[in-house]
Amino acid sequence: MSEHFSAPSETTLPGVSYVMPVLNDVTHVRAAVDSLLAQDYTGPFEVAIAVGPSIDGTNELVAELSAEDPRIRVIDNPVGSTPAGLNIAIRATTLPIVVRVDAHSVLPPNYTSVAVETILRTGAANVGGIMDARGTTPFEQAVARAYGSRVGLGGSPHHVGGTQGPAETVYLGVFRRDALEAAGLFDERIKRGQDWELNHRLAKGGETVWFTPEMRVVYRPRPSLNRLIRQFFSTGLWRGELSRTFPSRGIIRYFAPPLMVLVVTVGIILGIIGTIEAALGTPNPLVWGWIAPAGYVLLVLLATLTVGSKDSPRAMAWFLIVIPCIHFCWGIGFILGYLSLAGSTSALKNEGKNRR
């Protein structure tokens, strides 16, 4: 860890740069920015919002926020992607701690204080905590419940919690700028999963990524089924490519949804063939293929009755739809990404070695 991060005196704390990529987020961005201004951290700070070509009034809103507070700077992100926006904002700021902020996130008042204390105590290059998904509508509540359950996203610590310590990746992230710049910032070709890939590079370079459950960030889920489908298909697609490019010990858990998709799909095909032949008077054991989809439906029903029932009846009904949506969209995306011949991340391994 650099000398700059020696223990501060009672009156000095390292400065913090909040960086936030924004695109068509007019509904959530004000709450996200307000949570930054409400931090109890007493060190100096700056806010950089990299705004993409939005069409919902986001550009006008962030301009208004900047006019209200001179510590908020708005920068154009013509590409519009998350990693491009993050890099633009990082390069436009100078303070030694970089806090990644999502426009859908609301930071608790002690978020930065806990993060900086953890960096100073552990020497970690990046620290992060739990994505505490919370919805305001029945649909969003169902998505939030899926995020926070093992049946939904598999039970990663940054979704369901765990003990503090070194981790493969964390939600959002609070970085030492020196380590972040040495790693080469975010890879702008990776539209989803860029945080995991960056943390992979940090770890390969001898740095530590640290998880602490004390850092709990409120996250606002996508507000509609259409946007949820696009989100999880895209996330699965990039996770598949990253898993193919960067094999690791923990990768096996990523294959559960695509394996489920394959088993259920094959079961349906075999079941249809067996049923048709049986209807034509030729009994066929392929009819037993229906066991796979029936088993999956039973799993979803049980999850809805146990996990989903903690919310309102309408949210519970949405949970019945949200769970298979997450599983199949992520799983199908993963399969396509893992088998992709286009190889948008095929050169990442070699290029990663040349960044240092």
Image (cartoon, rainbow, N blue to C red):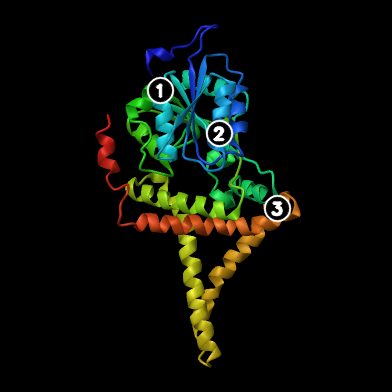
Residue count near mark 1 (Cα–Cα under 10 Å), binned few <14, some 14–19, many ≥20 = many
Residue at the disc numbered 1: 177
User: Which badge, 3 or 1, comes first in the chain's sequence?
Assistant: 1
Answer whether residue 211 is visible to the viewer in this image. no
The label number, if any, that marks residue 60 in the structure image: 2
Reading the image, the residue beneath label 3 is 315
Residue type at mark 2 is: Glu
Secondary structure beneath label 2? helix
Q: CA distance from mark 2 to mark 3?
A: 33 Å
What residue appears at the point 61 percent right and 39 percent down from the top-left corner? 27
Under circle 3, the secondary element is helix
Q: Residues within 10 Å of mark 2 (few under 14, many from 20)?
A: few
The kind of residue on which mark 3 rests is: Ala
Front residue of this view, candidates 224 and 160: 224
Identify which amino acid the numbered label 1 is placed on: Arg
- The Cα–Cα distance between marks 1 and 2, rounded to whole angstroms, is 30 Å
Residue found farthest to the right: 313
Task: Please name the residue shown 26% across and 38% down the image.
Answer: 351
Question: Residue 298 or 329: which is nearer the viewer?
Answer: 329
Screen quadrant of the C terminus: top left
Provide residue 337's location: percent of width, then percent of height.
38, 54
**Front-most of 7 and 71?**
71
On the image, the x and y values in percent for residue 137 come to 69, 47
Q: Quadrant of the N terminus?
A: top left
Question: Depth-wise, is mark 1 or mark 2 nearer the camera?
Answer: 2
User: Is 93 placed above or below 324 here?
Assistant: above
Q: Is residue 352 visible from the viewing direction of this image?
A: yes
Q: Are marks 3 and 1 in contact (CB under 8 Å)?
A: no
